[in-house]
Amino acid sequence: MPLVPTTAQAITEMLGRFGVDVAALKVSPLDDDPALAVLWTRAIARTGRRTLPLEVGLKMPLGMMAVVDYLAAASATVGAALTVAQRVFPLVAPGVQLLLERLPSGVRRVVIVNQPPFPGELESDLLVLGILLARMRTLASRPLELPRLELAEPHPESRTRWVELLGTSRLRFGTRRTSLHFSASDWATPLRSADPRLLATLETLVGAEQRTGDALLVAVRALAMQRLPATPTIGEVAPALGLSVRSLQRRLALSGTSFVEVLDEVRRNRAEQLLDEGLLTLGEIAARVGFAEQASFTRAWQRWRGEAPSRSRRHGSASGTKRTPPASKARAR
């Protein structure tokens, strides 16, 4: 599976939880398809378990797939979650696509497609299958029927372990592609974690930042923005993303930033937006972005922009485009 750094880190971390000493496998750096294929080959040989990629996917905690997890969890139904996952999955696994199909029987099929084919794609398919299956079962408000699971994995000598892991005997091996089948009622099943407001915020940020591929930063910014004017702490945000504080700190550091810097960026961007709109007083803007008093906001703006916010307003908007507020909403400032 073509990698982004956060996905490579998640796989490495999960293999460690399964008792696999990744360093001892001598696969470094883990930054391309052949390296990942070698990693899986050696890890499977070390453990003696062909099902290892599937096991890793099934046990990968919610949050480790970053923006895919957050968008899916905030969606209204299983079908909506998989639809949004289809759109954003390339952010965490470029080259792996989810194809959603409706069969004549009314069953919905989610097919894992590798474009173009790459080394280790069978192991990648098992990992993705485990991730999708575990998330839908965890998030759904009721048990799912899952009429069938199709695996490109060749027929195993024994199906027992596969049935145990996948929770169903309705398995078909040796298919052209790996896919999950959902009944119509499965597809419409509500999610316990549905959050329309968070979903809208995340979708806005993902749309604006899809080129960056840094899904974790998108999710952290979204949660911070959602909670304004409150000032969230890392101790509040990390659990919401399915991470420990230490893991979040480490992953942000790998992205060259910190939680404090991300929060500062979110407040600055929101302040610039409100200043551009020209509808609020400086005191009101300060309150909207989490400052207890206007003086604190002024000092922060001077640090961000090198001048007082009132001067930025006089010389045009924060983004450099002069805006005149509607007369009915303009206020004395």
Image (cartoon, rainbow, N blue to C red):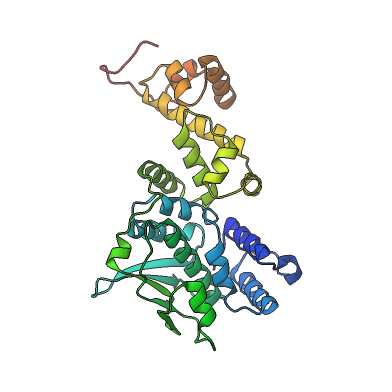
Residue 95, relative to residue 207: is it above or below?
Answer: below
Q: Position of residue 11 (x, y in %)?
A: 61, 63
Position of 42 compared to 263: left or right?
A: right
> Residue 262 appears at what percent x and percent y?
57, 38
Q: In the image, what residue occupies the spot 69% across and 68% down?
A: 20
Q: Residue furthest right?
A: 24
In x, y percent, where is residue 8? 61, 61
Looking at the picture, tell me which residue is in the foreground, 148 or 288: 148
State the residue at coordinates (70%, 69%).
27
Q: Is residue 315 visible?
A: no
The part of the image, by quadrant, that contains residue 279 is top left
Name the foreground residue: 2 vs 107.
Answer: 107
Quick check: 143 left or right of 233?
left
The residue at 48%/66% (across/down) is 95
Q: Residue at x 66, y 80 (%)?
A: 48
Quarter occupied by residue 107: bottom left
User: In which quadrant of the rendered image does the C terminus lie?
Assistant: top left
Q: Is residue 246 left or right of residue 81?
A: right
Outermost residue toward the bottom in this view? 157
Where in the figure is residue 247, as x and y percent of width and height? 64, 49
146 and 121: which one is in front? 146
